[in-house]
Amino acid sequence: MNECYELNVAGVTRQLPIIQIAPSLAIASFVILGDCELVTAAAPLLAEKLPQVDYLVTAEAKGIPLVQELSRLLGLPYYIVARKSVKPYMEQPLVDEVNSITTQKTQTLCLDGKDALAIHGKRVALVDDVISTGESLQAIERLVEKAGAQVVARAAILAEGDAAKRDDILFLEPLPLFPL
């Protein structure tokens, strides 16, 4: 499949390759890693939609450049990344598992104990590049709630498929799915 989907978001246009991920489903592959132009254009628009927060939390890895730029714009000195595995330096990590549309297998998400302590009792926004089924977002939310934080927003650049119909997420543009 060599088709592309033209995405226009925050004044930036990208040709996204349409990739088959299951026998009856394809997605437009949206990758912000390395796309400084898109991240710096989208982040201010997303920042305007966010309520006041103490921390931004994302999953490793594609949400990292977005939370970096959002944190800078919001004047937040630190953001939290739920890692994909327990690291030797982590003390008392919180762990959850998720099956997302793009990984197609069970994935572990871990919150370092020091990060859990930092967000305890704080207002956090969960941030990702794309929200699709919401499975990854729910896993991060479970970790954050285990840490005792209050989730006050769920945000992404794009809402894919039925996620665009949700009223509990903030996003800039919808992204269609491509049934085969």
Image: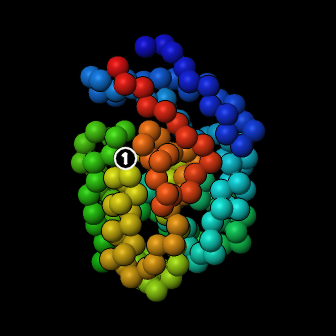
Q: In this view, does 93 lie above or below 7?
A: below
Residue 172 appears in view: yes
Q: What is the image's colouring?
A: rainbow
Q: Is mark 1 on a helix, strand or loop?
A: loop
Which residue is rendered at x = 40% and y = 57% of the image?
137
Foreground residue, 161 or 145? Answer: 161
Image side of residue 30 versus residue 147, left or right: right
Q: Residue 31: x percent and y percent?
A: 54, 37
Q: Specify the farthest residue to the bottom.
A: 121
Residue appearing at x 60%, y 43% in the figure: 173
Residue at coordinates 47% horizontally, 23% vertically from top-left? 18
Task: Provide the residue designation for mark 1.
Answer: 133
**Circle 1: residue type:** Thr
Q: In this view, does 138 lie to the left or right of 70?
A: left
* 24 horizontally vs 34: left or right: left
Percent of width and height locating residue 20: 37, 23
